[in-house]
Image (cartoon, rainbow, N blue to C red):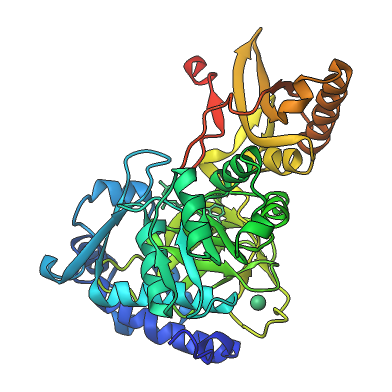
Amino acid sequence: MFWDTNNETLDRSSLEKLQLSLLQKTVERAQQAPYYGELFKKECITADSIKSLDDLRRIPFITKDDLRDHYPYGFLAVPRDKIVRMHSSSGSTGKPTVIFHTMSDIREWSGLIARCMYMTGVRESDVFQNMTGYGLFTGGLGFHYGAEQLGAMVIPVGAGNTKRQIMLMREFETSVIHIIPSYALHFIKSLQEAGIDPKSEFKLRIAYLGAEPHSDETRLRVEAALGVQAFNSYGLSEMNGPGVAFECTQKHGMHVWEDNFLIELINPTTLEPVKEGEDGEIVFTTLKREGMPLLRYRSKDIAAVITEPCPCGRTHRRLTRIKGRTDDMLIVKGVNMYPVQIEKTLMAIPQVGSNYLIQLEHKDYNDHMIVKVEVQAEMFHGDMKELQTLRKTITESLRSELLVTPEVELVEPGTLPQSEGKAVRVVDNRKQWG
Ligand code: ADP
Ligand code: ZN
């Protein structure tokens, strides 16, 4: 039950005891899947042989590639008849992976989302407009079922069609939205262009931002423009989707629901655990899933555990914002960087608009980085000197954040490609050079 906070405030040793018993059940269930059946036989792993949480380390990691190699049913642990729904990943890094859910999996997942929404203050009286894509993408139906389980009224509008979003928001007094951050910035720009003041014309009070890396600066923009409290929502389709880790009202780190997911943070190169508080790749083990239990799934997402207890009283550990996935890390002139560092820098500059694009070229035997930035339209009609000053300011801020000097190109709003789903921020034309 999402209003029962017992599990959320368990002391560490009770939580770990619960995790161990759930892990043993997971191993038992996973054995039925072709992939794990074979692996466990080879490695002599049985539920009884898992005597402590450390024994998990006897099981090898899996990655998206393993899921692809055993596509579609290699990880299925129940007869196909027990499956009531499938979802897939967005395919950001290649062929999408597929996850199967039993009825009980769907109930558990919905319960987790309801728990997240309840934690941030949503109640039955709220009207929830789900502004992310429906279909195979998990953000649509995931939040939909969670909000229904909580008892809120759901408007399943999906992504895009800004005019219709505004009409629904106004007429049905939407109080809570779920939206991809890049689309949120675009939506805000559209409101400004239409001369709509969301603070006086809408009844919005909460926004969930998730599905792609974004910075605190973006959150502050959304909060200021819409007059809402915005919370970071993290998830991945392999672990259901949203509802894996979520910010509480402290807005300082996301609680990982450790009664459903066991996390490890590893060094992606050595595969050894990192010290608490250090950045590492998050590795997940499902603790309750029936249809497709996954053990030690390498997410490729980089974050750190916040070591201090949360003032909200929940004991499930918090993760920092996701820095990016190891796949997204850019190496420019020998310097490592994540696209979100660029976002964070740009969004802190008020004249910067809602969109940007990072373009990488190979020129004269060297990496060349171009950052195209949309700025407010008025800037192009005023004094060109101001535009030059802004360009210098942006270049300087990026240089000090990245330690590489990019070429900054200022462009008018609406010039860069805009997606209603996850934004594509990087065009790397160096790849042809191998
Ligand atoms: P794909 O892996 O193909 O993008 P998913 O829809 O399963 O498909 O996306 C999950 C991924 O999205 C995560 O692994 C992570 O990289 C990213 N993601 C989701 N939520 C957040 C968030 N709040 N902050 C940063 N990244 C996020
Ligand atoms: Zn908290």
Task: Please tell me which residue is depicted at 63% across the width and 38% down the height of the picture.
Answer: 339
305 or 387: nearer the eye? Answer: 387
Give the total of numbered labels: 0
Toward the top, the furthest residue is 364
408 horizontally vs 143: left or right: right
Q: Eyeballing the image, is 195 above or below 251?
A: above
Query: Would you place residue 173 above or below residue 347 in this image?
Result: below
Seen in the image, is 340 located left or right of residue 264?
right
In the image, residue 239 lies at what x, y percent?
A: 40, 63
Which residue is at 73% across, 55% downward?
224
Quarter of the picture holding the N terminus: bottom left
Q: Determine whether, in the image, residue 355 is placed left or right of residue 390.
A: left
Picture quarter containing residue 426? top right
Q: Residue at x 86, y 18 (%)?
A: 383
Determine the residue positioned at 48% across, 52% down.
167
The percent position of residue 175, horizontal first and vertical second, equals: 55, 67
Residue 60 at least partly seen: no
In the rendered image, the vertical position of residue 192 relative to residue 297, given as above or below: above
Residue 320 in the image: state x and y as whole percent. Answer: 66, 61
Residue 36 appears anywhere in the view: yes
Locate residue 105: give its quadrant: bottom left
Q: Position of residue 315 (x, y in %)?
A: 61, 83
Tell which of 79 and 66 is nearer to you.
Answer: 79
